[in-house]
Image (cartoon, rainbow, N blue to C red):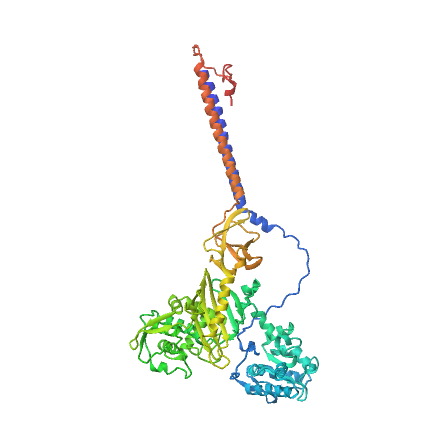
Amino acid sequence: MNARKTKTGRRGLRRASSAGGLVRLVLALVGVAAVVAAVYQLAGPGRDRAAAPAPTAIPTATPEPTPALPTVDLNSWEMRLVDIDHPLGENFAPPELTLIADNERVDSRIAPAIEQLLDDAHSAGFTTYFCSGYRDYATQYSIYWRHIDQYTGQGMTEEEAHAKTLLAVQYPGCSEHQSGLSADILESRDQNMVPEIGGSGLMLWLEQHCADYGFVIRYPEGKTDITSIEYEPWHLRYVGQEAARYMMDNDLCLEEFLALYQDGAGADGQQTVAARFGLDPGIETSAQTVLVVDRDSGEALYEKNAAQRLYPASTTKLMTALCAAEACGDLDDTVVTVRQEALAWLPDDTNSLAGLKAGEELTMRQLLYCMMLASGNDAALVAADYVDGSVEAFAQRMNQRAAELGCTGTCFVNPHGLAGEEQYSTAWDLVRIMEAYMAVPELAEIAGTEKYTFSTNMRQDVSLTNSDLLLSPDSELYEPSVVAGKTGTVALGSCFVSAQEKDGLRTVCVVAGVPPKDQFGYFISPNPALAEGRKFITWANGAFVPVTLYEQGDEIPVMVGDTKQYVEPEGGASITLALPAALAEQVTRDIALDPGLHMPLAPGTAVGTATWSCGGTPIREQVPLVLTEETSSMPMWIWAALWAVLAVLVVISLFIHRARKQRLRRRRRWEAIQPAPARTPARAPSRRAPVPTRDDDEPEDWEW
């Protein structure tokens, strides 16, 4: 029995030893996995890729660089385009004139440049005759009709005479000379002003050097179909040195140069959505300026002369109402008493009034309704008087607020808009002002109201009707998508600014420079800009739909190395664009990750860019992508391998445990059927270690 116990004990030791070896094996494998993870942490694949040599590039020819467009302010005085489509008007004159050579005058701002040009021409050995500088409207009128009389005297019809004259002389009010920025320079008083004198003598020198002084050849050779004026090598126009060099180096006339910034261009010279996708609204319009902007993206859907100066008329009241509301706070608690002094500031020719009376008391809300619905010039002056005490101080407030909104081509001199050329803006600036106005819910509600009734201490049940007929269901001009608008009319043109919402598409539309009078000289009613604006509003509503490229909070899955991570556009804001309705389902996204990324990476780390396209046309390019959470130090395949190894070890351990239990059951069954062993006399213990022997009756499979 003792021998059996001894053998059983030895077998137990052997089994224990075997199990301990298995445990050690498991621990060793786990240790190896840990070492692999540590090594990857210290010298991960990001470093391996960074250290890898770059592939050798195949040499290619270097293309000639395209000259960058100069940075110019299209609303600056030297960039003003003057022609029959962009007249100066009868009363325009430069702010200051300077007398220079040959008793001619020019705008004082270009006098130093023209004098230096003449001096250098003399130094180069040429004689000069400054034959024409500034010409007022009356002088241009006389020159124009003298040509007409000359040609009709030669037997031409009056229509033929006008066509012939316009090739050489601009119509009165449309001449570059009236701007004071042009100069006609010949070699002598007797030299004929004909195209043939170009390309030699002083004319050649002027062509080669005029840009050094900020001048260009205003009517260059081969551009008659653009400028409508035949080649005049003697006619210089000041545009500034940077623009002049670009135009002369690239053989551009002023119209072509401005078109680089304006044709199909939105803010900052970017192409409009319509131009990008080749969409033509096919709309005939009398408006000189048109701009339709997607409010969500800020992109121009369509534009026409959007950066050129326009005259805002009563759309000025958008800024007036905004400044008054911001200065007063609560519109209902602010009570305004109409002062006679404020009413005395009304221009004599004003005819747009809300009927306010001296001593009348209104809340600021009621006053704003009078201003926006009835377009009351008296209401605008009363608001200015209440806020700042004078027209000048309030105009200064308006200009400061415009600058804060990013308006670079706007100047206000009064709060009502009844002014001449000294009060001006641009379509883009009016969009910025309209956006700020609509951001105040109370103001948006006022401009979107069709009718309003109120009472004061002096009048009862005063009824006002919005001049924006696109808001009126009873009008033929009714447009359901319009949520707010403001009209304006002065002799220089009618205009209209409105905000629209339809099926998620939110736009602002500006039209300006619409002829305000009929053929008999009477102002057209209703405002003709309303019909012109409605054309572009309905077109935009049908041509475009809003498409969300990225929704705030969404995560974009990417593979950083071999690891799946999540990214979002930098800033995390939603990206929604107005796209052509026919292509809205053809939006694709391409992601480019930066090479050589080192992991782990912290949240917010830039890892690449995304580019969205619509119908193959890029619509958002190189949008930075950042991580939304910290990256793992190892790629997923290593983690998967480690988990697989651990799973195998667990399976092996379970198998060994099961095998041991089976052996133990067989052992017990065998012992249960064996006879009890005979007792033997005890012997003295031997000094020698017993030699182990195997019991022949014991099954061999008991051995480990």
Closest to the observer: 679 or 429? 429
Position above or below: 88 against 369: below
Q: Residue furthest left?
A: 457
Left or right of residue 430, residue 324 in this image: left
- Compared with 173, 373 (above or below) is above
- Residue 136 percent coordinates (x, y): 55, 86
Residue 348 lies, in percent from the top left, at 41, 84
Q: Is residue 164 visible?
A: yes
Work out whether residue 638 or residue 261 is closer to the camera in this orientation and state it: 261
Circle count: 0
- Along the line of sight, which residue is nearer the eye, 389 or 505? 505
Residue 405 in view: no
x and y percentages locating residue 68 in the rendered image: 60, 68
Q: In the visual, does 505 lie left or right of 227?
A: left
Q: In the image, residue 680 lies at what x, y percent?
A: 44, 10
- In the picture, which quadrant includes the N terminus? top left
Question: Measured along the vertical axis of the image, is residue 259 above or below residue 687?
Answer: below
The image quarter in which residue 277 lies: bottom right
**Residue 379 lies in quadrant:** bottom left
In this rendering, the answer to whether 129 lies above or below 4 is below
